[in-house]
Amino acid sequence: MELLTSLAALGGFVIGLIVMLAIRRQTEQAEEPEPVDDALPPGVASVLAVLPSSAVVLDREDRVLRASSAARAFGLVRGDALMAAELLALARKVRRDGEIRESEIEVAGRKFGQETTTFAVRVAPLGSHGQVLVLAEDQTERRRVEAVRRDFVANVSHELKTPVGALSLLAETIQDAADDPEAVTRFAGRMQHEAARLNYLVQDLITLSRIQGADEVPAPGPVPVDEAVHEAIDRCNTKAASKDITLVAGGTEGLNIWGDEELLVTALRNLIDNAVAYSPEHTRVVVSARPAGDSVEVSVSDQGIGIPDGALERIFERFFRVDTARSRATGGTGLGLAIVKHVAVAHGGEVTVWSKEGSGSTFTLRLPAFGGKAIAVPRTTTPLEAST
Ligand code: ADP
């Protein structure tokens, strides 16, 4: 009995002890401050939410506390781990000495067809609990634009070198032939030809840089398509006449686009110019307009040499030519179609091409109709015989 009483007393004591310990533990837990690592300094979360770049916050154990969706989409973060070893090493250095660091890193690419993605990163200490902020900016687009610009500058220099070199040579030759008036006249003629080429190139470069600078037409208005077509044809008449090529305006009369008349004339002039340059003598070039829903289509068709299939998708690139010698011989700058494309894009439209080698080509400009709908007024075809 005594034993029973003692056991009961011991049991009571043990239970009491357990209850006490449990209560103490609970109180301790309630009083224990939140783990510092998990708390972001005030305001940081809202700043991260509006940042366009990939942002990651690491705790003092290198675990990801917060990551923007861009950081996950780019594969910089998976689960709670920072995936780029280089970036992790940088974050550790920053945590150690508190210095902000900047660098460029390459991460295995997640976008289709892209092997690596280059990021400009900035790593900084955050708060006083060993947290580190990592900001990463995708540099792919900036690099692409830089490469295009570099290429363009290299191409322009190359294109300028040829006529400038020729002019300098011709000037020397004229000097040497000072007492031969016939030779002087001949070389002076060639100088004029080279100077004209230089002039076309500079003009086209100015036009291209002006349209490229604007994402859209600066001051759009209603533009009567017939007037633009006739003006473009007028400007190409001399060249067409020299090859006995007939320029014909046709299609639907009375259409208006919403845009810029000078730009439309420039685009059409380039297309007609090409049609004439790449067509044999005694052929026809037809410029034709038609309504197409909320757009107007203006096409330029020729019966010329056509464009090989393999070159079709490249012809709108700056300085791309199917046959460089032929383009040069016809006074081409290699910029005409790039200009046409940019005129179309600035109008919110497009330019397409159909071509068959040996049969001819049709370039079609699709531009927004004035008033949102192309209004068709039938018109009869008017041949405009090329005349000088
Ligand atoms: P270019 O000044 O050399 O004519 P473009 O940019 O106007 O430069 O045209 C690019 C290339 O596309 C030309 O060099 C030519 O090879 C081809 N091309 C353009 N238009 C035509 C056309 N109507 N017929 C055949 N080839 C054309």
Image: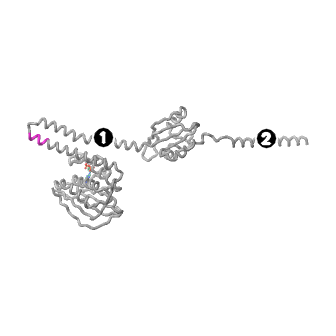
How many tags in the picture? Answer: 2
Question: Judging from the image, what secondary structure is the residue with disc 1 in?
Answer: helix
Image coordinates for residue 255, horizontal then vertical, percent: 29, 63
Q: Which structural element holds mark 2?
A: helix
Amino acid under disc 1: Ala
Q: Quadrant of the C terminus?
A: bottom left
Residue under label 2: 17
The residue depicted at 14 percent of the width and 42 percent of the height is: 188
Left or right: 227, with 66 as reference point: left
Which numbered marker is on residue 294?
Answer: none
Q: Find the magenta span and give its range.
A: 181-187
> Left or right of 370: which side holds 62?
right
User: Mark 1 near ligand 1 (CB under 8 Å)?
Assistant: no
* Whether residue 214 is situated above or below residue 227 in the rendered picture: above
Is residue 248 in view? Answer: yes
Q: Percent x, y for residue 296?
A: 32, 61
Residue 139 lies left or right of residue 310; in this view the side is: right
- For label 1, count other residues whose C-alpha is less than 10 Å away and answer few (under 14), some (14-19) or many (20+): few
Q: Quadrant of residue 378?
A: bottom left
Q: What residue would you read off at disc 1?
A: 154
Residue 61 placement (x, y as % from top left): 58, 37
| 320 part of magenta stretch | no
Q: Quadrant of the N terminus?
A: top right
Ligand 1 within 8 Å, label 2 CB: no
| The quarter of the displayed image where residue 224 is located | bottom left
Asked which colour scheme the image uses, the reply is: one colour
